Image (tube, helix red, strand yellow):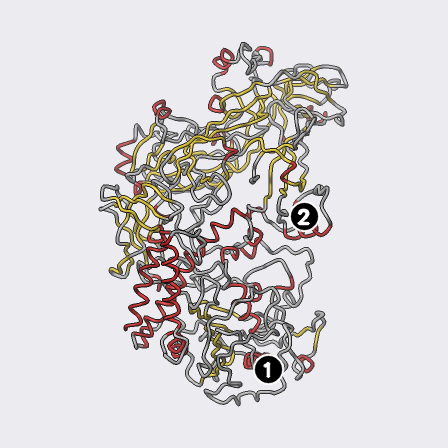
Amino acid sequence: MLCTEDIVVKKGSTRQPSPIATVERTVQDVDTHLPGPFMQEEDPIGRKGFSYVVWRKFSTDGVPPQGTVLIRWVRSDRVELIREDELEILHRQLYVGDVVMRGPGSAESGVVINVNSRCSLLPMGTATVKSNGKSLLSLSTFDDSTDSVRLSKQPPHLLDVPVSELQYEESPAEDDMIVYKGWLGKVLSMSCHLSLRLTDNSVVEVDEEVVELLSQAPELPRIGDVVKTKKANLRTGVWKFGRYNANVPPIGTVVSSRPVSIEVGWVSERLVGSIEHHEPPNVLERDEFESEHFRVYDRSRKPAASMDLPMVSNSEIEITMGLRVRFRDLAGAAVKYDGAGTVGKIERIPRQDTLGYDMNVFEVSSVSATVTIQWQDLSITTEPSTALIPDTAIDDEHAAWPGEAAHTLAASKIDGLSRPHQVGIIQSVKAAERMARIRWCPEASVAYTQPDTITEDGDVAEMIEAVVATATGDIAEVSLYDLDAAAELNVRRGDVVLLDSGNVYRDLSRGPGDVCWLGEVVDTQLDGMLLIRLGLSDEVRDVALKREYVHVVIRSDGTDVLDDGGEDDTDAEDSDWDMDTDSEGDDADKVTDEEEAVYQDENGDPMDVDEAENEDWESDEGGVDVDTDIPEGDLPPAVPVNGITNGLGISAGVNSSSAHHSQPTEPTTLGGPLLYLILSTAIPLSHHFASQPSSTSPATTKRIGKEHRILSSPDALPQGVYVRSWDSRLDLFRVLFIGPLGTPYASAPFIIDFYLPTDYPHGPPQAHFHSWPGESGLGGTGGVNPNLYETGKICLSLLGTWESGAKTEGWNSSKSTLLQVIVSILGLVLVPEPYFNEAGYEPLAGQEGSKRPSALYNERTFLRANGFVIGAVAALRARNPAALLSGMHDLQEELRWLYLKHAGPRLLDVVIERVEGILEKSRAGSAEVDGSAVMSKGATIPLSRIATRLRSLTEA
């Protein structure tokens, strides 16, 4: 299996050296699935051997078909869609801190603790200028179309060179971390002047913007490149050696690159010592970055003793194909690579031959790497990087690795805060069983704000206290579902941290200029301590510090720790491209709150109000014909428009064609609560939209009436859905969904509030999901579905909260209905495998590597969904209106009938029977864990407690 950023060649290539390419998109890497890939390229994308249908789909959604990848050829910068079996992998780049596994579907993963890379190097050659026949030093590669120069001499490659012996050709460079006056920043870009050595041995400095590469490489000019410019630029340049000669061709070799300004993205100021609160300018000029206050952070610096410690990470320079490098010790390298062995010989270029410029620069032509991994079971192996793949399931909320801090989900409420009962350090993990060994930290203290402080835009709970201390307590074997290795408690190898303790800083400081307030995590120890490398200190050293003494500012996985709040709102931005820019009804002219709604027919043509409002109007989803009218303001109080009791059928006319066809929710008994009912009671204060204005527009009011008639039609509502509205506010709805059989949501209650806004139906309904916090210690945490956020947000195309890229899936003012939204939630959200509802995960369905992550997601979801059952029934048993959970008001009797009444389906008993059946089958250990019928050992522990709690509710 190929992965993003792999270096590949075509199998059986006869060209020497074989052209190399980088993998840019795979079907597994959903982050690369940007729609409209051809719009991001200047040249057409190669697609030899693919049918029009396959190519059209890829051109639209950007997802490579199964068995293919999108690659970019390094020299030509050309992009091609190609079959994986036509390619051979040369190198897979892995970094310290990466989480990897041995193959798709592997249960166990591990953390890369060291990388040992080796490479082949292309030495400096010579090129001949065709106009005068003279030679220039060159690292460039030219093709036959270059009419100015040709390659005349290329020394043999140096082979098997350890990357630890190399350094970048120039410093600073883009992406380097720098420190300036107590601030940590990252180099975003640089403006440089280049010194060019011409064929008459003169040297002139010009702006990099006025030169042009003659090689095939698409990058900016670097030392060793042959470039051309205009004679006028030579005439006005700064002459270092010699002077302008009009007879000398304006072609030369770059022998030096001098920054004149550096653009910096500032990350953070220092937290201890002498603090400069004023942020430096975003662009540093030469006098600033050449001052004593400016320093480049070299992450490859290390104490000599660290090489003898296998658990300590030692960074190398980030090596890539085509990178220009130098030897750290050229004299020592010349002795080592003297031609006596098979690795080649360094032909040193004396400075006196190049006017004092150091031209001993090499280009990386191939790379290989072995990596050392600490696996979850605490074993350590060293393997080729190509034998491993990145773990795509690292967003698993219940995954953990040795050295991580974790706390129990069981917690107590103290002084308005939620405090986990215990905090500890993971010692090892049995990944297949979802069990961990953890050593407790007796002096630890963690506190969260309460979930009832939730807001629409904020986190469910915020960690406001985090003291881990050290692990000196007992070791226990615990289910991963009973633990949370919260990101706020943890760091990863390679993370950049700032010291956050003045006392520790004073102990470490060797003087006022010693940069010991900045470091890198090189080990996460099993006692909870962190080994921090002070790489910019006057004396590089590794120090062991408590977690609470450091603050992470740059994570090794590239995530931004400065913006770690709330839910991900990038979904709509990531998928807003559509091959056809016209949309039906979605982007018409917006209307204000009290403007008339605009209607369109099925072809998108305008309709007048009378035509749209006539008796033959129907939902596009088929067949709900409304023959009666409801007089405005004359609805009978507390009486359904059509009395619909619990039937068994689902109208074929309202099922979305793409929806999951759920099995019947449960066998039901006629005579139970009505599926649709208008109430005469006051709007419950818990209705999320109770304070929103109602429309005075006649067109909107009529359309709302039609929505009620559709919902009240016989057999319109799917089984397991109960709709409530109020005669005083027909634009408000509260809907109870009972999870369908065959899904992890089976028999669980989910309540959603709807509001038909004042511009309805031009704008879609607004919706709010009532997410209930589970009881402490019952294994449920986090969201219950990728589309249902804990903040109440619901991601659905019909609601306008998710852009699917398909114009037929969005809200259409003339066709879409509230019933269609309800059916979509039941059939597209509460599905058997909700893992694939994650943004962009749909293409992963059916892949071997997705089987286990989906099963684990179902385990967690099943625990969480049964927490909803417990919450609802416990509130009903309390017989106190104040005990009702958010959203239960005006549905409590329906819930009581469904779960507790003898005349009803007794769903509580059904749930208990299902949970106990899963426990029995899972404990037998004879069947494979699938996350539904059979669960892991770790899942059965909280599930057993859930069974006990459920049984207690039958006796209440």
Check disc 2 and give the amino acid type: Met
Q: Are marks 2 and 1 in contact (CB under 8 Å)?
A: no
| Residue 67 image point, x, y percent | 62, 44
- Quarter of the N terminus within the rendering: top right
**In this orientation, does residue 696 appear?**
no
Depth check: give the residue in front, 586 or 676.
676
Q: Residues within 10 Å of mark 1 (few under 14, many from 20)?
A: some
Q: Pick the quarter of the image with the C terminus.
A: bottom left
Between marks 2 and 1, how big is the CA–CA gap?
44 Å
Say left or right for 764 vs 645.
right
Q: Where is 469 relative to 887, above or below?
A: above
- Residue 278 is situated, as x and y percent measured from the top left of the image, at 41, 42
Q: Which residue is mark 2?
A: 39
Name the kind of residue labelled 1 in the image: Lys
Q: Which mark is residue 702?
A: 1
Q: Quadrant of residue 214?
A: top right
Residue at image coords 58%, 59%: 803
Q: Is residue 76 above or below residue 152?
A: below
Query: In x, y percent, where is residue 444?
Result: 25, 47
Residue situated in front as seen by the camera: 381 or 239: 381
- For residue 955, the mark is none
Q: Earlier in the sequence, mark 2 or mark 1?
A: 2
- Residue 631 visible in the picture: yes
Question: In the figure, residue 889 lies in which quadrant?
Answer: bottom left
Q: Position of residue 586 (x, y in %)?
A: 63, 66
Q: Nearer the viewer, residue 259 or 385?
A: 385
Secondary element at image label 1 = helix
Name the element at disc 2.
Answer: helix
Q: Residues within 10 Å of mark 2 (few under 14, many from 20)?
A: few
Residue at screen point 34% across, 28% down: 541
